[in-house]
Amino acid sequence: MKLKVPIVKLVIKDLITFDGVKLQLSETEKLLELSDKKIVLKDSIISNMETKVINLETIITKKDEQFSLERQKSESLLKELKQEKRKGFFYKIGSGIGVAATILLLLK
C-alpha cells in the first residue's frame, strides 16, 4: 500500500511527536521521583531538628532544676553557718562568764 507524500509526512511527524512526548513523560517522571526524594529528605531533617529541640528543652529543664537545687543547698548551708556562728558566739560568752565566775569564786 502506497501512501501519498503529505500523508507520509504527517505519519512521520506523528511518530516523532509521540517519541518526544514519551521522552518528555519519562523526564517528568524522573523529576517527580527526585521531588519525592527531596520531600522525604526534608521531612527527615525536620524530624531530626524537632528531636534536637526536644532534647535541648529537656537539657534546659534539667539545668533549671539543678540550679534550683543548688540554690536550695546554698540557702541551707547559709542557715547552718549562721546557726554555727551563733553557737560559737554563745560558747565564747558562756566560757567568758564561766572564767569570770571561777575567778570570782577563787578570789572570795
Image (spheres, grey):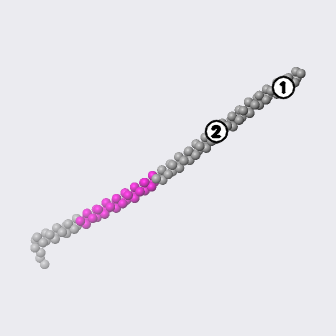
- Work out which residue is located at the far top of the displayed protein and give it: 107
The image quadrant where one finds the N terminus is: bottom left
Image quadrant in which the C terminus is located: top right
Q: Circle 2: is it few (<14), some (14-19), or many (20+) Cα within 10 Å?
A: few
**Is residue 26 shown in magenta?**
yes
Residue matched to label 1? 101
Q: Is residue 75 above or below residue 100?
A: below
Secondary structure mostly seen in the magenta stretch: helix
Question: Which segment is the magenta one?
Answer: 21-49
Q: Residue at x 79, y 29 (%)?
A: 94
Residue 71 place in picture, x, y as percent: 61, 40
Asked if the residue at tag 1 contacts the one at tag 2, i.e. Cβ–Cβ closer than 8 Å, the answer is no
Q: Residue at left 85%, top 25%?
A: 102
**Mark found first going from the N terminus, 2 or 1:** 2
Q: Is residue 20 above or below residue 43?
A: below
Residue 2 falls left or right of residue 73: left
- Image vertical order of residue 1 relative to residue 24, above or below: below
Q: Position of residue 87 (x, y in %)?
A: 74, 33
Q: State the SS at label 1.
A: helix
Q: Residue at x 68, y 35 (%)?
A: 81
The picture places residue 92, in percent across and down from the top left corner, at 76, 28
Question: How far separated are the C-alphas under marks 2 and 1?
Answer: 39 Å
Q: Is residue 107 magenta?
A: no
The residue that disc 2 covers is 75
In the figure, residue 38 lies in which quadrant? Answer: bottom left
